[in-house]
Amino acid sequence: MLKDNVINAFNLQFGTYPEFVVRAPGRVNLIGEHTDYNDGFVFPMAIDRAVWIALKPSDSQIVSVHSLDFAESIRFNLDSIEHTDKKWGEYIKGVAWSLMQNGYPLRGWEGFVSGDVPLGAGLSSSAALELATARAFSAVSRFPWNPSQMAQICQAAENQWVGVNCGIMDQLISAVGIKDHAVLIDCRSLEFQPFPLPPDTTIVVLDTSTRRGLVDSAYNERRQQCETAADFFGVGALRDVTLQNFEQNAGGLDPVVQRRARHIITENIRTVNASEAMKAGNPQVLGELMNQSHESLKNDFEVSSAALNDIVNSARKQPGCYGSRMTGAGFGGCAIALVQTPVVEEFTQSVCSDYHQTTGLTPIVYLCQASDGASLEKTTEPE
Ligand code: GLA
């Protein structure tokens, strides 16, 4: 559908079919929150909501892109990229800038972009746009597609061009996602391993319909606190602190920093245990780990919110729900629940009415399938 939209818009403008169509997905994280920038483990899946671009190479160094969603265009010269105020365009420029910083010779292109990853919901619409852009440049500039490397280049674009100090999770899963699987990622080595969800279970994404400002400053503060704790333990990252070491020595830490570190250290353990539960096909254990993750994010890392806690509580009350937790950076956005597939519909209805009764807010529910990472499709003209 979105694919058709970008192709049709392209066709209308240029009177031909695009030479390339690229796609990169958003993501949802099952467990392993705020662990990526501590060199730890995360367990996301790429979802079947994505950013699509239909494009053709241009003969110059000009990149011009029209967004169907924002009904506006950007145009810039690869030889002199500058910041402007169109937020979505900064992701595209940032990726171009980052690719060139890493020595990729780029060529200009013209295209149309559209996506169905909800914005600001914590499902990584920006990583999807970044990876789709990198995929587009790889196609027109004819350099080989190396998913992990491209994820790192896109992360650098977000850190250094856009100015958001995120970890590697969102870009990496958008690059390496695997259909029908969640992917356990070691954020230090960038090694990853796919696991199917336990049989007859579905991940239901529950959007609280709340968005919080100040996420960036709270996020940066958490990063800082984690670094303080790592320094205290004399390690490069909290990934290297065992629970035993923490329990024996954490008394010397400031109490807030101590709680932040406890979340990271226990969350890494839960995330690896979650992969064991997945391997064993055990939804009870996986759900319980998700519940514990939420409590830790709420009490120790303090990145949940009243709305997230309410929706998680509504979810946990329902029959057929194995576990529920907030997902993503926090403070608003989405929670997830692991639910028995046959009761998903009843589950969804009950959570929606319960959450509405408690908060007066109307949640949005996304039933997501795990999808493949960023891809290139050459289009064929109809007969
Ligand atoms: C955001 C960041 C990720 C990660 C999560 C929290 O999504 O972009 O790198 O840190 O928050 O797990």
Image: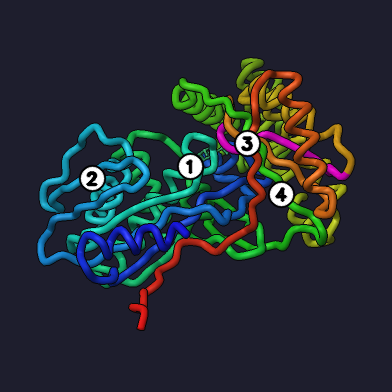
The answer to whether the residue bearing label 1 lies less than 8 angstroms from the nearest atom of ligand 1 is yes
Q: Position of residue 226 (x, y in %)?
A: 55, 29
Q: Which residue is mark 1?
A: 167
Please tell me which residue lies in front, 315 or 144.
315
Q: Is residue 324 magenta?
A: yes
Mark 2–mark 4 Cα distance, whole angstroms, equals 35 Å
- Asked if residue 337 can be seen in this view, the reply is yes
Callout 2–callout 3 Cβ contact below 8 Å? no
Q: Position of residue 320 (x, y in %)?
A: 87, 45
Q: Which mark is residue 73?
A: 2
Q: Which residue is mark 4?
A: 203
In the rendered structure, the answer to whether residue 67 lies left or right of residue 359 reads: left
Label whose residue precedes the other's in the sequence (1 or 4): 1
Secondary structure of residue under mark 3: strand
Q: Which residue is mark 3?
A: 364
Disc 4 marks a residue whose amino acid type is: Ile
Mark 4–mark 3 Cα distance, whole angstroms, equals 14 Å
Residue span colored magenta: 320-329
Disc 2 marks a residue whose amino acid type is: Ser
